[in-house]
């Protein structure tokens, strides 16, 4: 998917990225409606580039073509960081965003490494290896999103990586049959073996079974533990960003609950969260849930390299005013929250009702 428009102005690029997200990820778009515009627009640009990356690899039919796509992706990232991005809206927006928010090149390169593992048809021996995959394809995106929100504290970044990994595990649990029909198996091989399931035999003839349901339930339990860890980090985000991140978390947790309602059959059925349910999750996300988890819990071993890459990069010159903004935030945003929360809640509800009516 090449996100491009004849209008190559920054405004035209942003409009192209918004359109791509609205068409390509309804869950992300629904949650993103709760973000303040100053964050929503760069988030759309960032996510649009990540979608481009995923589609370039995923939509290529053969292994050789996927390998070429990975090489081209790395070159597009290099060009974006060098300041002369490819002639596409997503690339131009991405180049602007990584410079403005001090996003280390290691983060998008980690994403591409995960996509390369997909291209090679890699399987995962245990949950640790699967966490390493989720760290790359989703934890990296969570960390980049956190930087776009103006947050660079290691503990908050660790929790953002937890949330990204949890969402990826949920995706895997939901898409077991779809992935198997494409020749892909992400479930930990040792869990399958413990359940008496032969991985290659399942790929040759994917069918639901009580044993498979147990493995999927186990994976969703792992995801739930990460969602709980991530909840503690949301309080470290700017107040006006918190509802959107809570909404995204709860929508994805809702997917896991739908999988459970389907008897953990992700082979013949695909769990979906409907429009009204998304609206309910999003409105509920305006209020925090109590949690006993601590924000200072160390990052997963598999995501620690992402947090370290950010810590090693100085804050860019364009963002050096950030600490004073954080000081000002405490005095100003409390009042803004009181004024705008009701307005944004009503605006979101109206937009969501319009989306559902379509």
Image: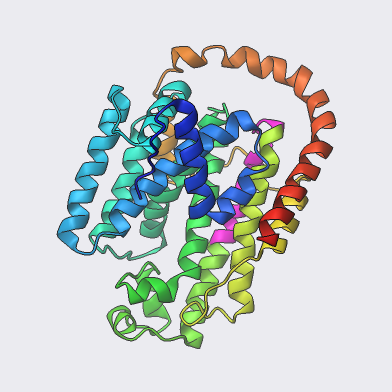
Reply above or below: 101 against 183: above
Reply above or below: 16 against 255: above
Q: Is residue 298 visible?
A: no
**Main secondary-structure element of the magenta-colored stretch:** helix
Residue bounds of the magenta highlight: 223-239
Q: How many marks?
A: 0
Image quadrant occupied by the C terminus: bottom right
Q: Residue at x 46, y 22 (%)?
A: 100
Reply above or below: 246 against 337: below
Q: Is residue 100 left or right of residue 180?
A: right
Please say whether residue 237 is one of the residues in the magenta stretch: yes
Q: How is the image coloured?
A: rainbow
Q: Position of residue 13 (x, y in %)?
A: 44, 33
Splitting the image into 4 quarters, where does residue 41 fall? top right
Q: Residue at x 83, y 39 (%)?
A: 342
Q: Is residue 220 left or right of residue 285?
A: left
Q: Is residue 247 left or right of residue 297?
A: right
Q: Position of residue 248 (x, y in %)?
A: 62, 51
Q: Residue furthest front?
A: 6
Q: Position of residue 317 (x, y in %)?
A: 45, 12
Q: Is residue 321 left or right of residue 84?
A: right
Q: Position of residue 28 (x, y in %)?
A: 56, 50
347 vs 200, nearest the viewer: 347
Splitting the image into 4 quarters, where does residue 153 fall? top right
Please say whether residue 139 is one of the residues in the magenta stretch: no
Q: Residue furthest left?
A: 64
Q: Is residue 91 visible?
A: yes
Q: Residue at x 61, y 75 (%)?
A: 260
């Amino acid at each position: 998917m090449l996100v491009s428009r004849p209008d190559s102005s920054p405004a035209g690029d942003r409009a192209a990225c918004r359109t791509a997200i609205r068409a390509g990820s309804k869950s992300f778009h629904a949650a993103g409606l709760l973000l303040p515009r100053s964050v929503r627009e760069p988030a759309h640009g960032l996510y649009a580039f990540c979608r481009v990356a995923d589609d370039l690899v995923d939509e290529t039919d053969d292994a050789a073509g996927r390998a070429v796509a990975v090489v081209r992706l790395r070159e597009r990232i290099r060009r974006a960081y060098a300041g002369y991005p490819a002639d596409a809206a997503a690339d131009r927006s991405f180049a602007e965003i990584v410079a403005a928010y001090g996003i280390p090149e290691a983060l998008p390169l980690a994403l591409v490494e995960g996509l390369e593992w997909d291209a090679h048809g890699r399987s995962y021996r245990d949950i640790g290896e699967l966490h390493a995959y989720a760290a790359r394809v989703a934890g990296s995106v969570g960390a980049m999103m956190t930087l776009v929100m103006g947050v660079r504290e290691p503990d908050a970044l660790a929790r953002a990586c937890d949330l990204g990994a949890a969402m990826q595990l949920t995706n895997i649990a939901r898409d077991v049959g779809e992935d198997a029909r494409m020749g892909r198996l992400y479930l930990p091989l040792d869990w399958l073996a413990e359940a008496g399931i032969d991985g290659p035999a399942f790929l040759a003839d994917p069918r639901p079974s009580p044993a498979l349901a147990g493995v999927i339930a186990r994976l969703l339990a792992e995801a739930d533990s990460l969602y709980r860890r991530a909840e503690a980090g949301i309080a470290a985000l700017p107040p006006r960003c918190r509802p959107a991140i809570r909404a995204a978390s709860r929508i994805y947790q809702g997917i896991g609950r739908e999988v459970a309602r389907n008897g953990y059959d992700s082979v013949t059925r695909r769990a979906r969260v409907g429009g009204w349910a998304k609206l309910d999750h999003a409105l509920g996300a305006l209020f925090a849930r109590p949690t006993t988890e601590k924000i200072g819990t160390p990052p997963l071993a598999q995501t620690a390299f992402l947090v370290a890459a950010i810590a090693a990069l100085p804050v860019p010159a364009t963002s050096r005013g950030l600490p004073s903004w954080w000081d000002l935030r405490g005095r100003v945003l409390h009042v803004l929250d009181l004024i705008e929360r009701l307005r944004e809640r009503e605006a979101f509800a109206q937009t969501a009702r319009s989306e559902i009516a379509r």
